Image (cartoon, rainbow, N blue to C red):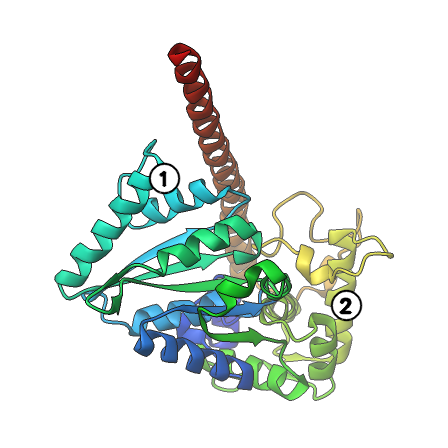
Amino acid sequence: MYEAFYGLSSKPFQLSPDPNFYYGSKQHRRAKAYLDYGVLRNDGFIVITGEIGAGKTTLLRGLLDSLNRSNVVIGNVVTTQLDAEDTLRMVGAAFGVRVKDAPKSELLMTLEAFFVNQVTQGKRCLLIVDEAQNLTPRAVEELRMLSNFQFSNQSLLQTFLVGQPEFRGILQKPEMEQFRQRVAATCHIGPLDEDETQRYMEHRLKCAGSTGKPTFDHDAFPAIHKASNGIPRRINRLCDRLLLLGFMQGRSHLTLADVKEVLRDIAQESETPRHSDASPLDSVPAKLPDSRPGALDSGPGSLDVAKLKMSVAEVDGLSSEIAALSADHHTDRLQRLERSMMRLERINLQTLALLQKLVDAVKQH
């Protein structure tokens, strides 16, 4: 929407992870070193934790892009509250192994045969488990058992566990002792500090083709850091709105007052209760501005149209962009509904499988 106004080649603060915009803060460089070490070692578990929006996915995508994909078979699992056996089925599905309705013993043998087959072809298997904080202790134990698979003294499977900070607490439980012994490296990605927040913003603008615009008052950076708590995704949301505000008002220089104005708008739109500890930036929709009626203002008449220094062509362009955003908003809603239906379908299949087992047991008696 505003790229041409600022002379940018792309959106600098998009919310979807993009390895091309990767910024190597101290903690991200440390985490990347652990990931690289894990790939070279090809053994055990690598645990990466961080707040929502800290940059874990971007880091992983950068790593995967650097691998020779012809020699690596990658399985991705996003966990939910599944039991241990269903977790194994998810692992099988992630690698394209047909394990539906197979008993656990057969399931394990099928997975082991698949891993051995890949190794004999000169390939390695890498499992990436996202949202690992949702794993039950029994599910973690099943993943540990998979790490026992070996062929000619070579591990058949390496696993990266990526989760939110609470996963660190789960791993400290007494029953996790055996699993902890299999962890080759662990790293937590914390928030950016104030200086890193400024460098992060400047880095993303440069990646988006900035040649000097937009510019920010020096005191705008501390305010952005404080409001975002140094979490990259929150920084992106706030800065995206800032650039939109500057575009709508015909200004390429943004001030502390602009930061405060955007924060007020976000707080009104998200309607965050005062007693909540959540940042209003966590509640901002993924597509900004929101296409719902009234989402750009706090009430009828609150937007002063006279302040918008825009030509007729710019207004027409803005109208087209808003229409596109509205379509994206509805698409996002349909995608969320589709994911919910898929989860319900999995639950129904699991329920039917249990009922079939009960029927078979009754027939045997």
Picture coordinates of residue 192 (x, y %)?
Answer: 62, 80
Q: Which mark is residue 261?
A: 2
Q: Which amino acid type corresponds to the residue marked 2 in the rendered image?
A: Glu
Q: Earlier in the sequence, mark 2 or mark 1?
A: 1
**Left or right side of 9 for 283:** right
Q: Is residue 89 above or below residue 125?
A: above
Q: Which mark is residue 239?
A: none
Residue at the image position 67 percent from the left and 59 percent from the top: 282
- Note whether residue 191 is visible: yes
Residue closest to the eye, 23 or 206: 23
Residue closest to the eye, 333 or 337: 337
Q: Give the position of the C terminus as an image quadrant.
A: top left
Image quadrant of residue 124?
bottom left
Picture coordinates of residue 329 (x, y %)?
Answer: 54, 45
Residue at the image position 30 percent from the left and 59 percent from the top: 149
**Left or right side of 111 for 265:** right
Residue closest to the eye, 67 or 308: 67
**Callout count:** 2
Image quadrant of residue 104?
top left
Label 1: which secondary element = helix
Picture coordinates of residue 16 (x, y %)?
Answer: 48, 61
Picture coordinates of residue 37 (x, y %)?
Answer: 37, 80
Q: Which amino acid type corresponds to the residue marked 1 in the rendered image?
A: Lys
**Left or right side of 44 for 12:** right
Instruction: Report if the CB atoms under discs 2 and 1 are less than 8 Å apart.
Output: no
**Left or right side of 264 for 335:** left
Residue beneath label 1, please?
A: 104
